[in-house]
Amino acid sequence: MTTTDLHRLTGAYALHALPDDESTAFERHLTGCEPCAEETAELSATAARLGLAVASTPPAALRAQVLRRITGVRQETPGRRPQNRTALARLRSRTLSRWALAACLAAATALGGTAVWQYQRAEDARDQARHATQASDEIAAVLAAPDARTRAAGLAGGATGTVVVSRDRDRAVFVVSGMARPPGGKVYQLWFDDGGTMRSAGLMNPARTDQAVLLQGTVDGSSGMGITVEPDGGSPHPTSAPLALMTFPS
């Protein structure tokens, strides 16, 4: 494969449409070709915008429908006992009934606890979905802002990063493609560069190599952003040398 051919693969690489051998060759090419790195990052950002534009939110009535169906499960009706029984049979029946009642009460208690647990899980899932939807909406708003400005750069290991800044919204989004996963027990942390003082801007998802991240907090005059490797959960201040420093577009 010639260098000319590699220059033409930016779009296919941004859409993850290359076979493994060509993808590996193109990633090696990116480390020494700044124009291709910038174009790939911009195309990745555009692909992210298109994906966010068609994202859908689950119907609001979905949770209520699930809970209603769970509570509507019919229990089996116990059979009728014969009327003519001996005294011993009646005694055994009453004894068994007490045990059955105790078992039913125990089962009801257990099922009640399970229902509470299921309800809490549903509430947690709903909160997570709401937060994810809110973050996606905010990311989309920054990417689609009329004053949005982008700056792309090649990162270590052949990764590409693009920062999108909207001064009107006072927010920034970092879009990365091909980012290697951090070491075990570590996470990538983003920072605002406030005139040389680094201010935390949130954590990246360590399980994803391609992602769009809304920087937490406002731009507020920051000149750029940085990325460091920090202990799981993040740090109040950088504890390692930056993997990358990017100046915000003017």
Image (spheres, helix red, strand yellow):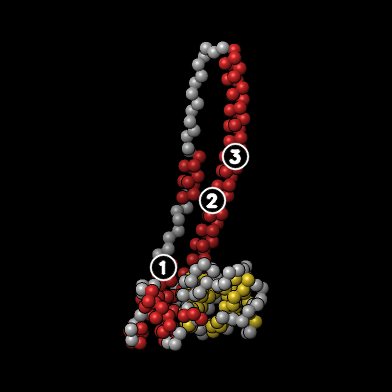
Element marked by disc 1: helix
Q: Earlier in the sequence, mark 2 or mark 3?
A: 3
- The residue lying toward the viewer, choosing from 19 and 226, is 19
Q: Is residue 42 left or right of residue 241?
A: left
* Amino acid type, callout 2: Ala
Kindly identify the residue that appears in the image at 54 percent across and 51 percent down. 122
Q: Is residue 18 visible?
A: yes
Element marked by disc 3: helix
- The residue lying toward the viewer, choosing from 169 and 157, is 157
Kindly identify the residue that appears in the image at 51 percent across and 81 percent down. 156
Kindly identify the residue that appears in the image at 45 percent across and 58 percent down. 57
Residues marked 2 and 3 touching at CB (< 8 Å) = no
* Amino acid type, callout 1: Gly
Q: Nearer the viewer, mark 2 or mark 3?
A: 3
Q: Which residue is mark 2?
A: 122
Marks 1 and 2, how far apart at CA: 26 Å
* Amino acid type, callout 3: Ala
Q: Which residue is mark 3?
A: 110
Q: Nearer the viewer, mark 1 or mark 3?
A: 3
Q: Which residue is mark 1?
A: 51
In which image quadrant can residue 219 be found? bottom right
